[in-house]
Amino acid sequence: MNQNYRKDTVCIQSGWQPTKGEPRVLPIYQSTTFKYDNCDQMGRLFDLEDSGYFYTRLQNPTNDAVAEKITELEGGVAGMLTSSGQAANYYAVFNICEAGDHFVCSSTLYGGTFNLFGVTMKKMGIDCTFVDPGASEEEIGKAFRPNTKALFAETLANPSLVVIDIEKFARIAHSHGVPLIMDNTFPTPINCRPFEWGADIVVHSTTKYMDGHAMCVGGCIVDSGNFDWSKYPERFPGLTTPDESYHGIVYTEKFGKGAYITKATVQMMRDLGSSQSPQNAFFLNVGLETLHLRMARHCENAQKVAEFLQEHPRVSWVRYPGLSGDKYHALAEKYMPNGSCGVVAFGLKGGREDFIAFMDKLKLTAIVTHVADARTCLLHPASHTHRQLNETQLKEAGVEPDLIRLSVGIEHADDILEDLSQALEQ
Ligand SMILES: *Cc1c(COP(=O)(O)O)cnc(C)c1O
């Protein structure tokens, strides 16, 4: 919109900009195809000589309007939607890494990303080294190799709630001439904008708070436009040397700050095709319109729940960055001063049976494989999302075997507290 509106206004007004007689609300362009008047017009699109729509696998006006809104919320220059958060993470790395390359990643990660980076991408010849995010710059620096192409981390890790020192990570990445890619799913740009602290690329699972209603799986990649690929032409040949699949265009030369997202769109998406359906993009946009309101309520409720759990005799430990005694409180105060997210992690005293009895007694709080939506829910990562990880990997990911991930919704806080309270009674 280029108006410097505040984030609340961007949530509602940005993206779709109707002109005279057009629908006020973002329309769903439910079309695979777009029409042109003559052969030459179409040819120019295929050569990337003109910009325009021709096939929804590459671009669709509904998706683009929503990507633009998220891009503006993050303060970036270009963005694209993907069919899932997994696809966003995969493309964000694969866009600059190929077989024989390597990247470094914080070990505090979502289980799905851990498998993608640690197992599946390894099979493609892309190696990943996991590092302890709390280690010194020197220690983390040791993981870098001549073929390292990126540093990756989750701003606020799912489910360990470890907060990354973004400035430290940006310094490490930049001193090795690679971009910092951050998965900003949990805080969302409402609570943290990694670009303001030096991150170069942001990815999202929009499935979580952005959608907010547990309706659509989706993802997004946003580029800050700040990383200068042409400064390291040998390290990023995919962006700085001719692409034979487009008659030899060079992305950095032709698209400048838009090089990274253009390549991800016209090459990754063209060839791998994890595009989001326009219908889902429409729902995502409805979610985004209230993101600023919902995030505030999630954080307010989660703070109350975390304080309640901390005082409860049956609870052995609680992790929530909003608690003054939390290990990551200071980092959260710095990077997310208005609140972190609605997820609280905690452990119960007693054994496995006590833990199962507690879960089964809950009435309002549902046991589901989801997190970060309007309804309060919970999950035991060691037996659900992170069950592929062994004991050591769980520890590295910051997931204690007894960790319960409680995703606090936007119901009335007292109802959530009463539900937890009755289930915690012996
Ligand atoms: C859920 C999640 C993902 C994966 O996203 P999907 O939309 O489920 O594919 C990636 N990163 C984080 C932090 C997540 O919470």
Image (cartoon, rainbow, N blue to C red):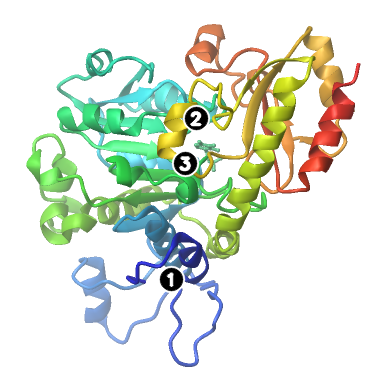
The verdict on label 2 being within 8 Å of ligand 1 is yes
Do the numbered discs 1 and 3 sit on residues whose CB atoms are within 8 Å?
no
Location of residue 230 in the rendering, given as x and y in whole percent from the top left corner: 10, 45
Disc 3 crowd rating (10 Å Cα; few below 14, some 14-19, many 20+) is some
Q: Which residue is label 1 attached to?
A: 61
Q: Which residue is label 2 attached to?
A: 157
Using the image, determine if residue 126 lies above or below residue 62: above
Location of residue 326 in the rendering, given as x and y in whole percent from the top left corner: 54, 22
Q: Which residue is label 3 attached to?
A: 337
Q: In the image, is 211 to the left or to the right of 269?
A: right
Using the image, determine if residue 374 lies above or below residue 7: above
- The amino acid beneath tag 1 is Pro
Using the image, determine if residue 292 lies above or below residue 419: below
Location of residue 176 in the rendering, given as x and y in whole percent from the top left corner: 16, 27
User: Residue shown at 59%/28% (left/top)?
Assistant: 323
- The amino acid beneath tag 3 is Pro
